[in-house]
Image (cartoon, rainbow, N blue to C red):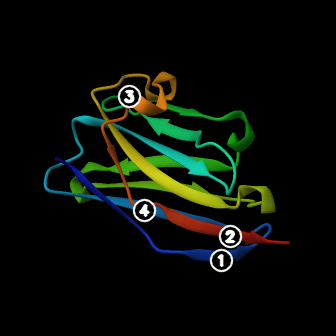
Amino acid sequence: QVQLVESGWRLVQAGDSLRLSCAASVRTLSSYAMGWFRQAPGKEREFVAAIAWVGGSTGYADYVKGRFTISRDNAKNTVYLQMNSLKPEDTAVYYCAARNRALRPWQVPTDDYDYWGQGTQVTVSS
């Protein structure tokens, strides 16, 4: 089993930038596509961004295009989510997830991801 460990709770102001990290333990993430999801209180978990297991192709939800960037460093066994121009509506718990050998992980249903991180609380104040 792959264990995913995310960075801790963050409090920022609107317009700020933040980078979330997700480090894999037990085994390497080199054979996995990676995704980021978020869930606000009282709402369903929603897709944010994903990167293919090979080739570096990425996909994003419409509401974060141009603001968020997903990247990976297989040598460090870590995936990142760079978040710029943060808005109060970005406030949520952010989860990283792994999906084995997905070329277009932005098209993979949430329930088909194999492993999940513990979640990182991101709060954006006005």
Q: CA distance from mark 3 to mark 4?
A: 22 Å
The residue located at (69%, 44%) in the rendering is 64
Name the front one of labels 1 and 3: 3
In contact (CB < 8 Å): disc 3 and disc 4: no
Sort mark 1 into few (<14), some (14-19) or many (20+) by Cα contacts within 10 Å. few
Image quarter of residue 115: top left
Give the distance between the C-alpha atoms of the residues marked 4 and 2, in whole angstroms: 16 Å
Q: Which mark is residue 112?
A: 3
Q: How far apart are the two marked residues, 1 and 4, measured between alpha carbons? A: 15 Å
Dot placed on the residue nearer the N-terminal end, 3 or 4: 4
Please give the residue where the numbered disc 4 appears in the rendered image. Answer: 21
Residue 125 vs residue 50, the one in the foreground: 125
**Is the residue marked by circle 2 packed among few (<14), some (14-19), or many (20+) residues within 10 Å?**
some
Q: CA distance from mark 1 to mark 2?
A: 5 Å
Q: Which mark is residue 123?
A: 2
Earlier residue among tags 1 and 3: 1
Three-letter code for the amino acid on which mark 4 is drawn: Ser
Quick one: label 2 or label 3, which is nearer the N terminus? 3
Task: Give residue 75's position: percent from left, percent from top.
Answer: 22, 54
Q: Amino acid at mark 1?
A: Leu
Q: Earlier in the sequence, mark 1 or mark 2?
A: 1
Observer-side mark, 4 or 2, equals 2
Assess whether mark 2 and mark 1 are in contact (beta carbons under 8 angstroms). Answer: yes
The residue furthest front is: 42
**Residue 31 location (% of width, % of height):** 22, 35
Of the residues shown, which amino acid type is indicated by label 2?
A: Thr
Residue drawn 65% across the image and 77% down it: 11
Q: Mark 4 or 2 closer to N-term?
A: 4
Q: Which residue is mark 1?
A: 11
Q: Is residue 38 above or below residue 16?
A: above
